[in-house]
Amino acid sequence: MSSDDTRNTEAEQHDTSWSANLEHPEHAESRERIVSDAIDAIERTATGRHVNLVTHEAHGHPSSYLYPVLEDECESLDWEFVDRCGCGGYVTRVYV
């Protein structure tokens, strides 16, 4: 599957729990892109489900740049840091 196919799949509404891959080259280049795509993934996740936001390792732990945005824009949601993934990224689970 090409990266374009992956992104097309991720553009759909998700009625089940899922993972959003925010480790593409454009995410490595831009924290703003990670944050924007993370918010988009949350908005496309059905109520009662969760999305795992897998963020690029290039920006370090998401507590320094993603969590403050979640606190401001998604204050009614819960999230937790899960772990680092095998590829070096960071996994944050957001409950919708």
Image (cartoon, rainbow, N blue to C red):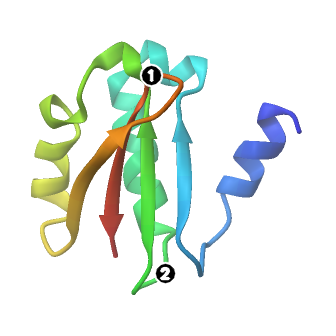
SS type, badge 2: loop
Left/right of residue 13 with respect to residue 17 in the rendered view? right
Residue 17 in the image: above or below residue 54: below
**Is disc 1 surrounded by few (<14), some (14 to 19) or many (20+) residues within 10 Å?**
some
Mark seen at residue 40:
none
Front residue of 30/79: it is 79
Disc tally is 2
Residue that label 2 marks: 46
Q: CA distance from mark 2 to mark 1?
A: 28 Å
| Residue visible at 46% across and 34% down in the picture | 85
The x and y percentages for residue 27 are: 48, 24
Q: For the residue labelled by badge 1, is the local secondary structure a helix, a strand or a loop?
A: loop
27 shown above or below 76:
above
Residue 78, image x and y in percent? Answer: 20, 69
Residue found at x 56% / y 41%: 21
Quarter of image, res 32: top left
Q: Residue tagged by mark 1?
A: 88
Residue drawn at point x = 71 percent, y = 44 percent: 7
Locate residue 72, reporting x and y percent.
Answer: 10, 55
Instruction: Report whether 43 appears left or right of 87.
Output: left
Q: Does residue 77 appear to the left or right of 33 in the view shown?
A: left
Q: Residues within 10 Å of mark 2 (few under 14, many from 20)?
A: some
Q: Is residue 89 left or right of residue 4?
A: left
Mark 2 or mark 1: whose residue is earlier in sequence: 2
Where is residue 13 drawn, in percent x and y? 62, 72
Callout 1 amino acid: Gly
Residue at left offset 48%, top offset 57%: 41
Residue 49 figure quarter? bottom left
Say what amino acid the circle numbered 2 marks. Ala
The single residue placed furthest to the bottom in the displayed view is 48
Picture quarter with the N terminus: top right
